[in-house]
Amino acid sequence: MSATRLTIPLFPLAAVLFPDGPLPLRIFEARYLDMISRCLREDSEFGVVQIRSGSDIGEVETASVGTLARIADWYQGSDGILGITARGTRRFVLRGMGRQPDGLYTAEVELLADEPQLQLPEEFRSMAALLETVINDLGRLYDAIDKRYDDAAWVGYRLTEILPMPSAEKQSCLELMDPIERLRVLRPMLRPFRHERGQ
């Protein structure tokens, strides 16, 4: 079966977005206001990709793997700035990138296969329990997201986006194709938090 290719608007960010993860944004630049308006009107997605160097107001170098985002909610702030909450859907590989006259980046991307839904192995159960505690503490940002604490990929994605890790390490975890390998990478980083919470 051939891979699915799409041409999408691109939002380069310092952050890394994961499938099923929340992304709150404040939008004020005309190019992104137009992009969000079009995505809402057409019920379409945009791509989020990590900035490696440069700035999206000029030339930018990005990671090669990113995540599609779908707008879940939006509001107009009292300061006139548009606020949105997007949610990650599927990962993609960048195959080509261009820039429109208004400064908006667009990209041809190839969708990556969804990770298999794997039952969380027993050895990682304590990581899921810690994640559940943290998500309950975080409140509203995760309220509308289906919780799947028995799914190895879902647990790994949520831990990676929540943990205070360098963005390059988050990007490496996004690019891993094996949910169990991702959990093994994350496990040593959780030791300080287990100690703090008496686990």
Image (cartoon, rainbow, N blue to C red):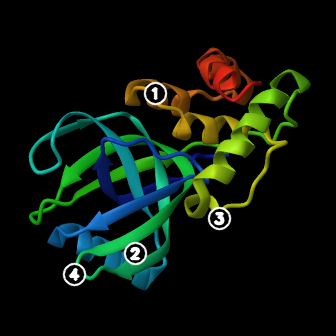
Q: Which residue is denoted by mark 4 in the rendering?
A: 80
The residue that disc 1 covers is: 165
What's the CA distance linking mark 3 and mark 4?
A: 26 Å
Q: How packed is label 4: few (under 14 Cα within 10 Å), some, or many (20 or more)?
A: few
Q: Does residue 58 appear left or right of residue 47 in this picture?
A: left
Q: Secondary structure at mark 4?
A: loop
Bin the neighbour count of mark 2 within 10 Å (Cα to Cα): few under 14, some 14-19, many 20 and up.
some
Q: Which mark is residue 144?
A: none
The residue at 30%/79% (across/down) is 77
Residue at point 39%, 80% (across, down) = 75
2 or 1: tag closer to the N-terminus? 2
Measure the C-alpha gap from mark 4 to mark 2: 20 Å
Q: Which circle's residue, 4 or 2, is located before the other in the chain?
A: 2
Could you tell me how far apart the alpha carbons at marks 4 and 1 are, in whole angstroms?
33 Å
Disc 2, SS: helix
Amino acid type at mark 4: Gly
What residue would you read off at disc 2? 39
User: Tag 3, which secondary structure?
Assistant: loop
User: Against 197, is 195 above or below?
Assistant: above
In this view, 190 is above or below 73? above
* Image mark for residue 143: 3
Occupied quadrant, residue 162: top right
| Of the image marks 3 and 1, the number of the one nearer the N terminus | 3
Percent across and percent down for residue 80 are 21, 81
Q: Which quarter of the figure has residue 119?
A: top right
* Front disc: 2 or 1: 1
Instruction: Tell me which amino acid carries mark 1.
Output: Met
Q: Is 122 situated left or right of 114 in this image?
A: right
Residue 83 in the image: above or below residue 80: above
